[in-house]
């Protein structure tokens, strides 16, 4: 056997080995997922909010902020939205929730730009209380009016008054935090989502 034929044989074996390695690399994750599904095994880790399963796509629409600025569907995209649905007005309990939301948002640190806070109320935009809240929280988006009421209806009337909702960067309603939620838990959920999500 010549040296050339030996080299060709070794090259073929090396090529086959590389091919098998590549197949294994692509097949192994798939096999793991199938096994997890078959044996009903799910990784550990819990969320602090109530998961909405499956996530519910919102019918987003053209809205207007308290300052009269347009708030279109694109403003929901690419950001995680923490939404408080105040219905007709924002009372004392609502204001306390907004304060907690501000603390959670600020705690995100360098990730703060990936989330936004939204107050959704059907009250008239001339409500003096809303103007005061806007002055207190300039980076809070306040959406008002009848169209805001139509959007608010999509969040579900079965949830306790004062719930906070998490909308993902694709416009899906995915989690709810009832009144009395733990702010630290919401922060942990958000950080986990931002770390592992490929959107927003």
Image: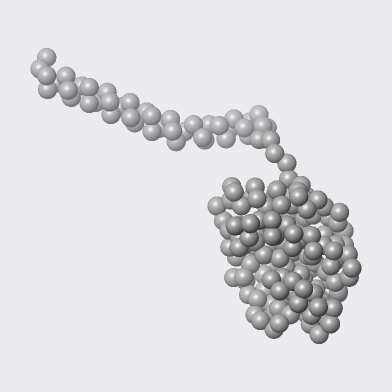
Where, quadrant-wise, is the C terminus in this rendering? bottom right
Q: How is the image coloured?
A: one colour
Residue found 84% across the figure and 82% down from its top:
128
| In the displayed structure image, the side of residue 56 where residue 9 appears, left or right | left
Q: Position of residue 179 (x, y in %)?
A: 86, 56
Residue 137 in the figure: left or right of residue 96: left
Q: From where the camera sits, is residue 169 visible?
A: no
Residue at x 17% of width, y 23% of height: 7
Residue 96 at x, y percent in the picture: 85, 64
Nearest to the observer: residue 90 or residue 12: 90
Extreme residue toward the right, this view = 92
At horizontal 66% and vertical 29% (from top left) the residue drawn is 39
User: For residue 141, which quarter of the picture?
Assistant: bottom right
Q: Is residue 45 left or right of residue 182?
A: left
Q: Is residue 59 above or below residue 71?
A: above
Q: Quadrant of residue 86?
A: bottom right
Residue at figure coordinates x 87%, y 62% from the top left:
161
> Does 127 appear above or below 35?
below
Which image quarter holds the N terminus?
top left
Q: Give the number of callouts.
A: 0
Residue 97 appears in the rendering: yes
Q: Position of residue 189 (x, y in %)?
A: 70, 49
Return the residue found at the far top: 1
Q: Nearer the viewer, residue 153 or 89?
A: 89
- Depth check, front residue: 135 or 17: 135
Q: Which percent across, then down, holds residue 78?
A: 58, 63
Above or below, comparing residue 67 to residue 26 in the picture: below
- Residue lying at the far left of the rendered structure: 2
């Amino acid at each position: 056997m010549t040296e050339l034929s030996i080299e060709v044989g070794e090259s073929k074996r090396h090529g086959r080995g590389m091919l098998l390695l590549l197949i294994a690399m692509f097949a192994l994750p798939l096999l793991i997922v199938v096994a997890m599904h078959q044996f009903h095994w799910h990784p550990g880790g819990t969320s602090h909010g109530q998961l909405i399963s499956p996530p519910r796509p919102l019918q987003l629409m053209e809205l207007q902020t308290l300052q009269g600025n347009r708030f279109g569907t694109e403003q929901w995209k690419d950001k995680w939205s923490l939404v408080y649905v105040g219905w007709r007005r924002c009372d004392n309990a609502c204001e306390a929730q907004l304060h907690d939301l501000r603390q959670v948002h600020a705690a995100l640190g360098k990730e703060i730009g990936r989330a936004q806070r939204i107050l959704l109320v059907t009250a008239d935009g001339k409500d003096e209380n809303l103007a005061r809240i806007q002055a207190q929280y300039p980076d809070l988006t306040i959406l008002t009016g009848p169209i805001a009421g139509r959007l608010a209806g999509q969040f579900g009337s079965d949830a306790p008054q004062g719930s906070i909702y998490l909308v993902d960067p694709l416009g899906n309603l995915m989690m709810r935090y009832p009144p009395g939620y733990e702010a630290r838990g919401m922060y942990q959920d958000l950080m986990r989502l931002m770390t592992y999500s490929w959107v927003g």
